[in-house]
Image (spheres, rainbow, N blue to C red):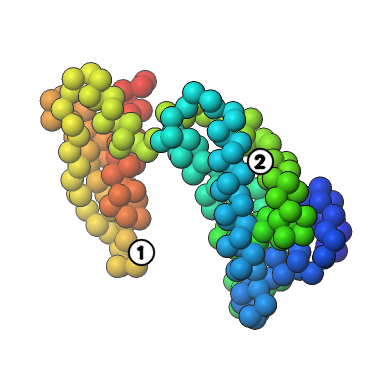
Amino acid sequence: MPLPVLAERLGYAFGDVQLLEVALTHRSLGRRNNERLEFLGDAVLGLCISERLYSLFPEVEEGDLSRLRASLVNREALAEIATGLELGDFLKLGGGELKSGGFRRSSILADALEAIIGAVYLDGGFLSARDLINRLYRDKLSSLPPPHELKDPKTRLQEVLQSRSLSLPEYEVEQILGKEHEQCFRVVCRVPSSDLKGRGEGASRRKAEQSAAAAILRKLES
């Protein structure tokens, strides 16, 4: 698909189209790839989102601002925006990545979007990059959840239990399934001072514990 189509979707006309071409080039295609632009774009994105959140939430504390930012600049959020742009149709990948469906891989899409931000910053300066980020993130910024809901389930559970004068939760691994590189952890979470119990699964102990904590939170909030 021709690059002017992507430029139109981005709402930005490149003075140096080669910057956009490099931003779309994965390392699997050679040394002239988008990794350096990705590095730059990551920094610009973090600054612009931080600035926007600072303005939107004047009463929110630093910890909650950090959680809000993390929810916006993570791989999943970037990949979702990239998918909306159909960015995969424009990527330049090596043969191996093409065969394995790299144009759909979240990590590759997210990295390419950050590289594009870096390219816009070099081509048009900070204000152009900030305008691009504000356009890309318009919907996400307008539909952010309350900051406290972004805390991980284990932290939220601990706070809820403390507010109700209940003992802190205890976690126990019940089972580990699968081979070492494809393990599935099954964890049970108990609250000793009550009959509350929740189970969860995950690819790591931490994820399984978070899942188990979330199960108890659902019971408490129902």
Q: Residues within 10 Å of mark 1 (few under 14, many from 20)?
A: few
The front one of 127 and 172 is 127
Whether residue 200 is visible here, answered yes or no, is no
Q: Is residue 182 above or below residue 95?
A: above
Quadrant location of the N terminus in the rendered image: bottom right
Tell me, yes or no, whether the two marked residues, 1 and 2, touch with CB atoms within 8 Å.
no
The front one of 168 and 178 is 168
Q: Which circle, 1 or 2, is nearer the viewer?
A: 2
The front one of 189 and 73 is 73
Query: Is 70 on the left-hand or right-hand side of 8?
Result: left
- Kind of residue indicated by mark 1: Glu
* Disc 1/disc 2 C-alpha distance (Å): 34 Å
User: Residue lying farthest top?
Assistant: 164
**Residue 204 point in image, percent of width and height:** 32, 55
**Residue 113 point in image, percent of width and height:** 66, 56
**Residue 156 point in image, percent of width and height:** 33, 31
Q: Quadrant of residue 220?
A: top left
Q: Earlier in the sequence, mark 1 or mark 2?
A: 2
Residue at 82%, 65% (x, y): give it: 16
- Kind of residue indicated by mark 2: Tyr
Query: Is 74 on the left-hand or right-hand side of 150?
Result: right
User: Could you tell me which secondary element the residue under label 2 belongs to?
Assistant: loop
Residue at 52%, 49% (x, y): give it: 74
Residue 182's disc is 1
Residue at 54%, 27% (x, y): give it: 57
Residue 137's disc is 2
Whether residue 119 is visible here, answered yes or no, is yes
Quadrant location of the C terminus in the rendered image: top left
